[in-house]
């Protein structure tokens, strides 16, 4: 008799190789289980745990089935989702190349764009999934999207882009990950590159595997997750220098950067209450919400044990 698959507990990923055997964590579904091209929710959970605090404003410019919105709310972050083909009421119909958000409002941006033409998402002509990596039009559009992400992200904050390379039989291989990383680097500083193991059903299907073997090509076994940082503005750098030399309590407000001559409607009133706070990694409250056994994490080796372990590790 077949046993029901039991999901392992959701724990923080600590290496640059990420893996979790389910599309969703916990007993509920984040996003839509039937949406083709949805992001595995544990990826967004890990990013938000590491790089944001409760109350932070999270943006997903290509929100698809809304996985980012559900994970953000699960962790008590605020979230705004955009897409040219909204699948639910809390996603705004917007082209990611023109986000209706003021400059420097977001505390974190996550994006899982189409990987050029690998899936047909909608009939909307603005969908970047209709653009070719071969003629470069896909990269031009993604440069605009990445520029918008940079514009709406607060200085000294992080963003994550999840993407796969593409191989099309008869057309060739497109290193979409490398190309997008090159564009990201024009705007941001790289923090890390994560390789995420794909568990797509097609990878297990005999006919797909046979075709790859006989046709001398490879199936996509991993996705890239690029984690990038937006530089603090020079005025922020100065502010932190001044703050360090100023007596406590005399903290000056920084003026906000406004773009002139821009009449686009904006999602106002989304200021973070936590703008100057850095996320303390993995609070107990967040773990509890994700259904994890807290006692495992509370038991810490005492200092002496810890030092011994460190020594042993060095010898290895
Ligand atoms: C890989 S899916 C996103 C999946 C999503 N993270 C989820 O978990 O459901 C890519 C999405 O990008 C959207 N998209 C494509 N071009 C867009 C554009 N120019 N502006 C906004 N969204 C776009 C598509 O409609 C699709 O929903």
Image: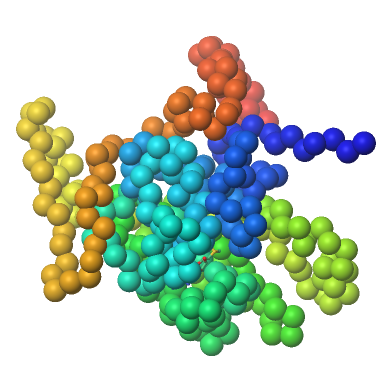
Quadrant including the C terminus: top right
Image quadrant of residue 265? Answer: bottom left
The residue lying at 40 percent from left, 67 percent from top is 93
Q: In this view, does 138 lie to the left or right of 97?
A: right
Where does residue 183 sit, x and y in percent of width and height? 43, 70
Q: Can residue 49 be seen in this view?
A: no
Q: Is residue 48 left or right of residue 264?
A: right
Q: Is residue 200 above or below residue 145?
A: above
Q: Is residue 207 above or below residue 91?
A: below
The residue lying at 7 percent from left, 32 percent from top is 250
Image quadrant of residue 141? Answer: bottom left
Q: In this view, does 118 lie to the left or right of 56?
A: right
Where does residue 2 sit, x and y in percent of width and height? 88, 38
Q: Which of 184 and 85 is in front in this view?
A: 85
Quadrant including the N terminus: top right
Q: In this view, does 145 lie to the left or right of 101?
A: right
Instruction: Return the residue found at the far front.
Output: 89
Where does residue 192 sit, x and y in percent of width and height? 49, 52
Q: In this view, does 117 lie above or below 34?
A: below
The residue lying at 16 percent from left, 42 percent from top is 241
The residue lying at 62 percent from left, 36 percent from top is 27
Q: Which colour scheme is used?
A: rainbow
Q: Can residue 304 be seen in this view?
A: yes
Instruction: Return the residue found at the far right.
Output: 1
Q: How many labels does the image show?
A: 0
Where does residue 167 sit, x and y in percent of width and height? 68, 75
Q: Is residue 25 above or below residue 269?
A: above
Instruction: Return the residue found at the far bottom.
Output: 135
């Amino acid at each position: 008799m077949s046993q029901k698959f039991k999901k392992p507990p959701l724990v923080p990923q600590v290496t640059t190789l990420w893996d979790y055997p389910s599309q969703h964590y916990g007993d509920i579904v984040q996003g839509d289980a039937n949406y083709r091209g949805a992001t595995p929710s544990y990826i967004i959970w890990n990013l938000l745990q590491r790089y944001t605090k409760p109350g932070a404003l999270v943006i997903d410019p290509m929100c698809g089935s809304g996985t980012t919105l559900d994970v953000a709310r699960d962790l008590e972050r605020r979230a705004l989702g955009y897409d040219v083909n909204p699948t639910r009421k809390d996603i705004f119909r917007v082209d990611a190349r023109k986000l209706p958000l003021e400059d420097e409002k977001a505390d974190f941006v996550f994006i899982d764009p189409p990987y050029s033409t690998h899936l047909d998402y909608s009939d909307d002509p603005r969908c970047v999934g209709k653009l070719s990596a071969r003629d470069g039009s896909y990269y031009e559009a993604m440069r605009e999207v990445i520029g918008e992400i940079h514009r709406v992200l607060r200085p000294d904050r992080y963003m994550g882009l999840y993407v796969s390379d593409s191989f099309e039989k008869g057309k060739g291989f497109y290193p979409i990950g490398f190309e997008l990383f090159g564009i990201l680097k024009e705007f941001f500083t790289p923090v890390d590159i994560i390789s995420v193991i794909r568990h797509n059903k097609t990878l297990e299907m005999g006919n797909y595997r046979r075709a790859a073997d006989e046709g001398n090509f490879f199936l996509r076994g991993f996705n890239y997750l690029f984690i990038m940082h937006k530089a603090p503005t020079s005025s922020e750098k100065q502010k932190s220098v001044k703050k360090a030399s100023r007596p406590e309590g005399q903290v000056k407000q920084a003026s906000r950067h406004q773009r002139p001559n821009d009449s686009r409607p904006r999602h106002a009133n989304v200021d973070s209450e936590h703008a100057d706070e850095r996320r303390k990694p993995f609070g107990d409250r967040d773990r509890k919400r994700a259904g994890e056994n807290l006692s495992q994490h509370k038991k810490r080796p005492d200092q002496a044990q810890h030092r011994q372990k460190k020594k042993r590790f060095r010898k290895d």
